[in-house]
Amino acid sequence: MIAMNNEHPLHLMTDQDKAMETSIKDVFPNTVHRCCKWHVQRKAREKLGRILSMDEIFEQVFYGVINDSEMVDEFEENWQHMLHCFDLVDNRHLSNMWRTRETWAPAYFRKNFFPFTSTTGRSEGLNSYFKTFVNPQDSVWRFVQQYEVLQETMLDREDNQAFIGHATTAPLYSRYNFERQAVHFYTRSVFLKFQKEVMASTGFLMNLAPALDNASVRFELHSNYFENPRIFSVNVVLAEEKFECSCNCFEMNGIICAHIIRVMVHLNVQKNPQRYMLERWSEAATTAMSSGGCLLDFGHPATNTLKYNALCRKYTWLASQACSNDLAYKIMNDAAHQLEPLIAAAKQGALQEQQEANQQQATQQQQQTPEPTTVSQPDGDAMLQNPARVPKKGVRLKNQRGERLCLSNGKMHIRTMLRKMKRSKPSPEENLDQRRKRLLARTTTKKVTVSKHAST
């Protein structure tokens, strides 16, 4: 919401998640929420897989009713007719789809802006593309590295597309002035979609129909070869440069359809009306911010590194702009010389303020301490202390002589006794066998003593 200037989205598309649907109704009550058609059809294939695989005619009718119905009344009539023809009125999943039809059927969203998509495939494709770079078993450092590679790859592709758009011009299909206008206005990808509409406009025949009022003219269009028996209606108000088509292509995608283009050619309209040239599809919108936008201010960077990076980006861009002109270079150079004493003074003032703040903090600490310590410490260095000793694992016991014994996992360590034997010098007359016997005897004595202490 902060990034969007606290403006609610007009349209949202998600999968069939009940929790998300409930949250969107509560948080965005005025937003049009649409379910992804791909998820709806995938669930339908899971529930109706046997029927769809056994009856090809039903499969064609099922997808045709969903995708080819343009009006709400047409969709509802065709759906009920399909259920009665194939005797599927009592099917549970089809009943659920009918109950939730207003959230997923394309006919209900013909006048809502969902440009060039009816699924969430773009976000799903980005997730799939990201998974090719990162694996679940990767470390955090590996994740950051791969994310940077992914970002650089996507930016490089965008730069290549931008270069192609600036260095080349898309070939025109016709010699219409509105197509030449569109090639200089739209981005390359949007212009190719517009050009397809121009090509499709040649496949329609047009007849004059009774107008809705005296100020408008209405035309009916149908296919040349009767490939599609559907009739499209275009209502025109020339005084206002207003074109309305029954297919609602402009309302959905933001570009005019082939039916309006056919009518424009018939009425000798040379240019696209300005109201149908959306700024969001223009080449200028991809290179500069519109006048209505604003940059977010997140405050000053917290660390010196972030401040350095932010200033480098800003002044690198300024240097790239100033180096192309002598006057601009002189202005930039003079401004840099003027900034040097100001920055030095600001830096010196900041250092003085920091020193005063440190002195005040030290004075307050001395006043709050009732009895200052008399231990002398070296100037400028803090007193170093040894880290706390970690106690050893196991149970510590003492024998009758006061020697510490350590029991760990039911076994006794005789480190103290071994140290004593290493320190004591054996007499020359004792051989190795006698020393081993004495060691075993002492070990047995220790075990007995420890067992008595443990029992008590």
Image (spheres, helix red, strand yellow):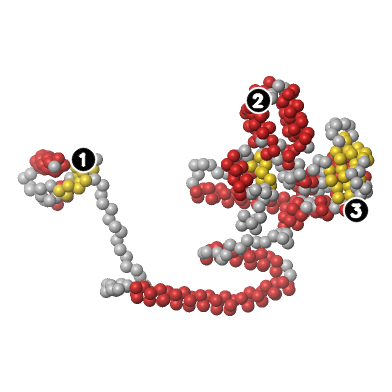
Camera-nearest label, 2 or 3: 2
Q: Distance between the Cα atoms at labels 1 and 3? A: 102 Å
- Is disc 2 placed on a helix, strand or loop? loop
Per the rendering, the mark at residue 260 is none
In the rendered image of this protein, does residue 146 appear above or below residue 291? above
x, y percent for residue 327: 73, 73
**How far apart, in angstroms, are the residues tagged by discs 2 and 3?**
53 Å
CA neighbours of label 3 inside 10 A, class few (<14), some (14 to 19), many (20+): few
Reading the image, the residue beneath label 2 is 91
In the picture provided, is 16 more to the left or to the right than 202? left
Whichever of callouts 1 and 2 sits on the residue coming sooner in the sequence is: 2
Instruction: For label 2, count other residues whose C-alpha is less than 10 Å away and answer few (under 14), some (14-19) or many (20+).
Output: few
Q: Is residue 352 visible?
A: yes
Would residue 44 be seen by someone viewing this image from the given angle?
A: no
Q: Amino acid at mark 3?
A: Ala
Q: Type of residue at label 2?
A: Asn
Nearer to the camera, 136 or 120: 120
For the C terminus, which image quadrant? top left
- For residue 208, which quarter of the picture? top right
Q: Which residue is mark 3?
A: 239
In the rendered view, does 64 fall on the left or right side of 51? right
Which residue is pictured at 76% across the width and 44% down the height?
111
Residue at left offset 66%, top offset 55%: 7
Q: In the rendered structure, are the residues bearing label 1 and label 2 in contact, judged by CB atoms less than 8 Å apart?
A: no
- The numbered dot on residue 411 is 1
* Placement of the N terminus among the 4 image quadrants: bottom right
Residue 25, compared with residue 354, is above or below; it is above
Residue at 10% x, 50% y is 401
